[in-house]
């Protein structure tokens, strides 16, 4: 598994992956109006990491680094369950400088379980454009104080 920064050459493929994955995973929503170009609006201003496996793009994550906010994490349905999401999530978490945050759709039980398994905590609920969501936090362990002595 290789996690790397997004390049413009990734855009056409990731547009397709984004559309396909939403249609596959968010079946409770009406996706008839979704289009390939939705990807462009979603990642605007974000740091995007791309997962490759055996030379194939298999997922991506978009984060707002200044806010320690994971905005999106999508894995090609054909590659789900193979550690792609975990590798992307670990790469994102490694960039956090303080408590990380994300919003997960309440209806997306599989994603909630995934984040809980990786140490995220449910903090609050809210209403968004695509329905109710759960606000989740990933608390960073405090760094040891410099100069402290251990026994």
Image (tube, rainbow, N blue to C red):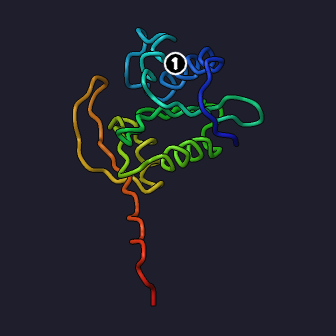
The residue located at (64%, 39%) in the rendering is 3
Q: Nearer the viewer, residue 100 or 124?
A: 100
Q: Which residue lies furthest to the right in this view?
A: 54
Q: Which of 78 and 120 is in front in this view?
A: 120
Q: Where is residue 29 in the image (x, y as percent from the top left)?
A: 37, 21
Q: Count the numbered circles shown.
A: 1
Using the rendered view, name the quadrant where residue 52 is placed: top right
From the viewer's perspective, tell me whether residue 32 is left or right of residue 78.
left
Q: Position of residue 139 (x, y in %)?
A: 36, 56
Q: Which residue lies furthest to the bottom in this view?
A: 151
Pointer 1: what residue?
19
Using the rendered view, name the quadrant where residue 134 is placed: top left
From the viewer's perspective, tell me whether residue 34 is left or right of residue 54.
left
Is 89 situated above or below 41? below
Q: Where is residue 1 in the image (x, y as percent from the top left)?
A: 70, 43
Secondary element type, mark 1? helix
From the viewer's perspective, tell me whether residue 55 is left or right of residue 36.
right
Is 119 situated above or below 6? below
The residue located at (40%, 41%) in the rendering is 109
Q: Which residue lies furthest to the front in this view?
A: 147
Location of the C terminus by quadrant is bottom left
Q: Position of residue 9 (x, y in %)?
A: 66, 18
The residue located at (52%, 30%) in the rendering is 48
**Crowdedness of circle 1 by 10 Å Cα count: few (<14), some, many (20+)?**
some
Is 70 situated above or below 116? above
């Amino acid at each position: 598994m290789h996690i790397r920064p997004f390049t413009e050459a990734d855009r056409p493929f990731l547009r397709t992956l984004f559309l396909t994955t939403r249609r596959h995973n968010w079946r409770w929503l009406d996706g008839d109006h979704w289009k390939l170009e939705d990807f462009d609006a979603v990642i605007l201003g974000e740091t995007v990491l791309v997962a490759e496996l055996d030379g194939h793009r298999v997922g991506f994550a978009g984060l707002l680094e200044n806010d320690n906010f994971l905005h999106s994490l999508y894995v090609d349905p054909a590659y789900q369950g193979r550690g792609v999401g975990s590798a992307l999530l670990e790469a994102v978490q490694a960039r956090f400088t303080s408590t990380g945050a994300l919003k997960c759709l309440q209806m997306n039980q599989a994603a909630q379980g995934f984040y809980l398994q990786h140490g995220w905590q449910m903090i609050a609920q809210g209403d968004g454009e695509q329905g109710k969501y759960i606000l989740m936090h990933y608390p960073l362990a405090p760094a040891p104080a410099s100069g402290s002595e251990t026994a």
